[in-house]
Image: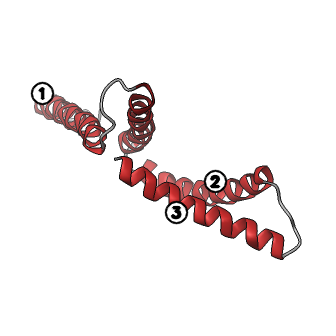
Amino acid sequence: MREAILILTEIVNIFHDQLLHISNALGLNMSDKELHLWVFGVLGILSFFIVHHFFKVLAKHSITAISFIYTFTVLVVIVFAVEIQQKITGRGNMEFQDAVMGLWGFIIFFIGYLIIKLVFRMVRRLFKRPGRRH
């Protein structure tokens, strides 16, 4: 995991330096804070439009899917925060496999939830009185 973080860090640093260079070449001379404002502002709003469209389409079919995506995204952040915390404090090993296994735990439990939900729906349909819509 350390290697993956170092590679990502290097990519971000190269991108950061290039943007600062372009900013200076255009005479904008942006500070690091101004650069962050623009990069994350643009990246954030573009991501929002894509996610918003995707979720609107998905909402017509399944709120559960939206809840899963949101929860999974939050868990990715938490899992990597825990792994980084383990590296900083020296309590435990910072390993990519640990992060993956943590996320698999959620996926396995979520599949169990879906199975239980499916069984309840099937039982409800089995005992539904004829002529009732709900």
Residue 4 left/right relative to 57? left
Mark 1, secondary structure of its residue: loop
Estimate the x, y position of residue 63 in percent, counting from the top left. 41, 41
Query: Badge 2, how many Cα within 10 Å: few under 14, some, many 20+?
Result: few
Q: Earlier in the sequence, mark 3 or mark 1?
A: 3
Residue at which label 1 appears: 127
Disc 2 residue type (three-letter): Gly
For the C terminus, the quadrant is top left
Residue at which label 3 appears: 11
Estimate the x, y position of residue 38 in percent, counting from the top left. 75, 58
Query: Badge 3, how many Cα within 10 Å: few under 14, some, many 20+?
Result: few
Q: Nearer the viewer, mark 3 or mark 2?
A: 3
Estimate the x, y position of residue 100 in percent, counting from the top left. 27, 43
Residue 74 left/right relative to 113? right
Q: Quadrant of residue 121?
A: top left
Q: Residue at x 89, y 72 (%)?
A: 27
Q: Residue at x 23, y 34 (%)?
A: 105
Q: Is residue 48 visible?
A: yes
Disc 1 residue type (three-letter): Phe
Mark 2, secondary structure of its residue: helix
Camera-side residue: 30 or 79?
A: 30
Q: Nearer the viewer, mark 3 or mark 1?
A: 3
Estimate the x, y position of residue 131 in percent, counting from the top left. 22, 35
Residue at which label 2 appears: 44
